[in-house]
Image (cartoon, rainbow, N blue to C red):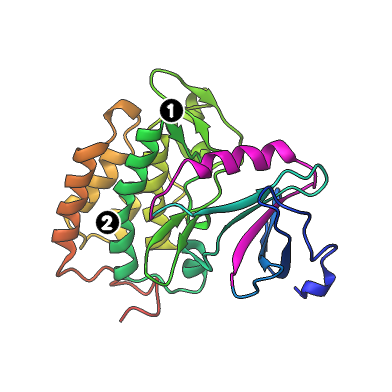
Amino acid sequence: MDVKKMSNPITQISVNKVFYQLTDILYYTRNTGVYIGHPLETPKHKYAIKKPIPIGRVNLVKKEANTLRQIIHPNVVRYIDHSEDPTEPYLVMELVDETLDGLIWREKISKEIIVKYLLQMPSFLNLFHRLGIAHTNINPGNIGYDISMNLKILDFSDAISCQYPSKQKIKCNSAAVLSPEFLLNDEINPLTDTYCAARVLECLLFGDYIVADEPITTIQEHYGHLPDSFFTLYRMMTKENPLERLKGLNLQKRVEEVIFDLEHVEVFTSNLFANEK
């Protein structure tokens, strides 16, 4: 969309006393508009600027900004700045142009990307556990992918403090609604993110979530050549009882087994992805 059609391409002043020029639209969701922009006086510094829809939701911006400011981690999008303006609040973050969802839609998923996801997945899950938060919306659209092939977890607007034995209610537009704990009790827990992260593997292999009572059966039918360690990892991350799901060093070890076993395995043997021969 042409930036000239934006209602206000110059933002209000931020908490760091900076004005930003919006130059392009990255995407819209039901709740936010995300733009590319730069500080008015330094055009070479490109950032992602997120505005809530409808405008004026200051508390939503403050909440996400406060969450991101706690985190300095290679697998989490970096906080830059934000505005608490009552009519035009916004959040400024590191610009990550690509997402796993975008790669899926453009049929650019490869074995290399799946391996990268597996390798980096334990790192961000363990981070959330240490911080005592649940992201609640781990899905391909919220996983960025930068030019250095690092995953970047995006959109912490639904993140909440979450530690055992507490359980919390969540919004219905989060990926966590896929989990047994939501389906049974409308609740989430600290290991709901682990469940969601495993379900992302379905999207990387099939282009979308599997609609079935036992998704692992569908994966085995189409990708029976994958090593047993892959199916064990998926099964142990999606246990119905969250307390039985993999975490910490046990998760890391299982992932390392899968990576080793995948070394000489061709992931895509079907016609699901045209770029893999």
Image coordinates of residue 64 in percent, x first then y, are 59, 42
Q: Who's the residue at 30% across and 26% down the image?
A: 243
Q: Secondary structure at mark 2?
A: helix
Q: Who's the residue at 75% across and 40% down the image?
A: 57
At label 1, the amino acid type is: Asn
Image coordinates of residue 202 in percent, x first then y, are 39, 55
Q: Secondary structure at mark 1?
A: loop
Image coordinates of residue 255 in percent, x first then y, are 22, 50
Q: Is residue 36 above or below residue 196?
A: below
Q: Which residues are magenta?
A: 45-74
As for residue 157 lying within the magenta part, the answer is no
Asked whether disc 2 touches disc 1, contact meaning CB atoms under 8 Å apart, the reply is no
Which quadrant of the figure contains the N terminus?
bottom right
Image coordinates of residue 208 in percent, x first then y, are 48, 58
At label 2, the amino acid type is: Leu
Q: Is residue 171 above or below residue 55?
A: above
Count numbered badges in the picture: 2
As for residue 52 lying within the magenta part, the answer is yes
CA gap between label 2 and label 1 equals 24 Å
Q: Earlier in the sequence, mark 2 or mark 1?
A: 2
Q: In this image, 77 relative to 221: left or right?
A: right
Residue 114: assigned label = none
For the residue pair 98 and 254, the one nearer the viewer reads as 98
Residue 119: assigned label = 2
Q: Who's the residue at 22% across and 52% down the image?
A: 230
Q: Which residue is mark 1?
A: 189
